[in-house]
Amino acid sequence: MERKIHRNFRITPEQLQHLEKQSERYNGNHSQYIRKLLDEDMGKNHGAYTKEEFLVKKQLIYEINRIGNNINQIVKNVNMNFYSDYEKKKLFAMMKKLLELMEEQEGRNDTDGRVDK
């Protein structure tokens, strides 16, 4: 997308300090950071992440998918009566712990100042 419109605006020294701090998180580009904020406000972006945050989130999704595949295999074996009642209870306890960890991670993302849509 080609940028054709140039705007000047005034901000307070505190706002400038915040802009510089946040822009540094996003590779030091003020314009890019402001465009991300506008896109979020317009519903075009699902949260502004740094490259490092994006890679961590991508790795987390990959790991959760692997765990999900393992759970599916275990559930198949449970349904075929390969496991005892004790092993089934242990499986459900591990699944509950995984769910709690995922909810805890979501809680951290909700409180870090970004808006995930």
Image (spheres, grey):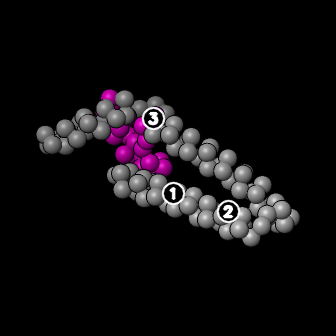
Instruction: Name the foreground residue: 34 vs 110.
Output: 110
Label 1 CA crowd tier, 10 Å (few <14, some 14–19, many 20+): few
Residue marked by disc 1: 101
Q: Is residue 5 visible?
A: no
Q: CA distance from mark 1 to mark 2?
A: 15 Å
Residue 72 falls in image quadrant: bottom right
Q: Which residue in the rendered view is the most extreme toward the right?
A: 80
C-beta proximity under 8 Å, tags 3 and 2: no
Mark 3 or 1, nearer chain start = 3
Q: Secondary structure at mark 3?
A: helix
Q: Amino acid at mark 2?
A: Leu
Instruction: Name the foreground residue: 67 vs 55.
Output: 67
Instruction: Name the foreground residue: 46 vs 35.
Output: 46
Which mark is in front, 3 or 1? 1
Q: Which residues are magenta?
A: 28-51
Where does the image place residue 115, in percent across and percent down from the top left? 41, 54
Q: CA distance from mark 3 to mark 1?
A: 21 Å
Question: Which residue is depicted at the point 82% across and 60% down?
Answer: 77
Where does the image place residue 13, in percent across and percent down from the top left? 13, 40
Residue marked by disc 3: 52
31 part of magenta stretch: yes
Question: Which residue is depicted at the point 68% across and 53% down?
Answer: 68
Mark 3 or 2, nearer chain start = 3
Q: Which residue in the rendered view is the most extreme toward the top?
A: 28
Label 3 CA crowd tier, 10 Å (few <14, some 14–19, many 20+): few
Q: Is residue 100 left or right of residue 28?
A: right
Q: Is residue 73 left or right of residue 7?
A: right
